[in-house]
Image (spheres, coloured by chain):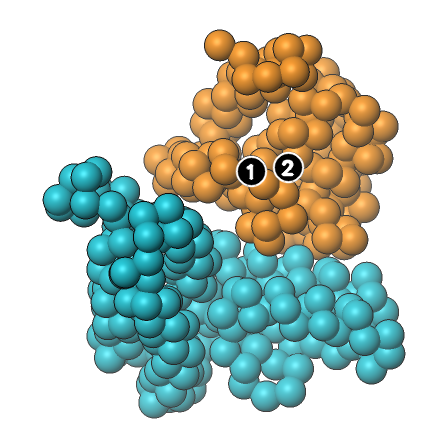
Amino acid sequence: MTDHEQPPTALPDRPGQWVLLSYRLPREPSTPRITVWRKLKRLGVAQISDGLIALPADARTREQLDWIAEEVTDSGGTATVWIAHPAALAEERKLAQAMADARAAEYEQVRAQAQQARHQPDDERQRTLRRLRAELRRINRRDYFPPPQRRTAETAVAALQPANTGTTPAPEENSA
Amino acid sequence: MKWATRAGIHIDRAACAWLIRRFVDTDAEFVFVADPAEVPADTTPFDMRGAELGHHHGDCSFETILRRYDLTTDAALKRIAAIIHEADLDDERFDAPEAPGLDVVLRGLSMIGDDEHTMTVTKPVFDGLYEYYRRATLLGREPA
């Protein structure tokens, strides 16, 4: 969505604010555990240890983790939400790098799929384009430290646009 | 009645405040607090952790309020609820292409004004959306 392409190494000199969720859910039933884990994965959290996850703190991430904490307690578990600074810059870099690597792998999958779809018939390629745009949007939303693979994937997906709708990528290509 | 929610309102809280004032309590007064502990005793909290009118069973607060005040039979409100759900939770439970756009509008608004300003601007926006989906329901197709 946004166009800033800060590599993870461009973090500030001092550790920033992170929001942590510490949670415990009963082993059974397993459905709430799986639901919570899927939601956390969707948010692109960094797993610090079993039952402790982190996201860079902003209004949205704080709220999202608050609601997941509520869901954990609704399901008979316990959860606390914390605002924290990593004590050392290196800790933060490791966390950010792990998150950037996870996103890079996702972008790489999208790029590979776009590459494969290049020679599909027009209608099929159009369907792939729509699907991959949606997938890119999902990844962008959980991408807090955009890796270079982001731009590569966006370019590969934009290249699926049929030639007769314009030779240069439409502006919406970058925002999709 | 007095109602309280967290300060720095976004899509779900703005929509809830509109819903409350239009369908639940026309004289509603709103208090915005930084911490749940600051909610005054005589107010009803919404869209806050621990509140009855919050996120429950995978629903956003707007959906919870619809259920709590028996408003789920209004098709236009149901449609708005689907949009708010997707804008707020983005979990693809509903097909609501309006959601990302509305979410960005609300996020932008929160950057240029306080909560009173956001509420003032969003009131006619939600009134308009409601009218649009009300007509869509009556017509059975997209209104002109």
Q: Is B136 on the left-hand or right-hand side of A130?
A: right
Where residue A172 appears, as percent x and y from the top left, is 27, 42
Relative image position of residue B86 (x, y in whole percent): 58, 44
Q: Is residue A34 above or below residue B104?
A: below
Q: Residue at x 59, y 88 (%)?
A: A49
In the rendered image, which residue does mark 1 sit on?
Answer: B96
Q: Residue B82 has which mark?
A: 2
Residue A75 in sight from this viewpoint? yes
Residue at image location 63% in from the left, 68% down from the top: A38
Which secondary structure lies at badge 1? loop
Q: Is residue A37 left or right of residue A75?
A: left
Identify the colour of chain B in the image.
orange
The answer to the question of whether label 1 and label 2 lie on touching residues, with beta carbons closer than 8 A, is yes
Chain A drawn colour: cyan
Label 1: chain letter: B
Name the residue type under label 2.
Answer: Ala
Q: Residue at x 13, y 45 (%)?
A: A168
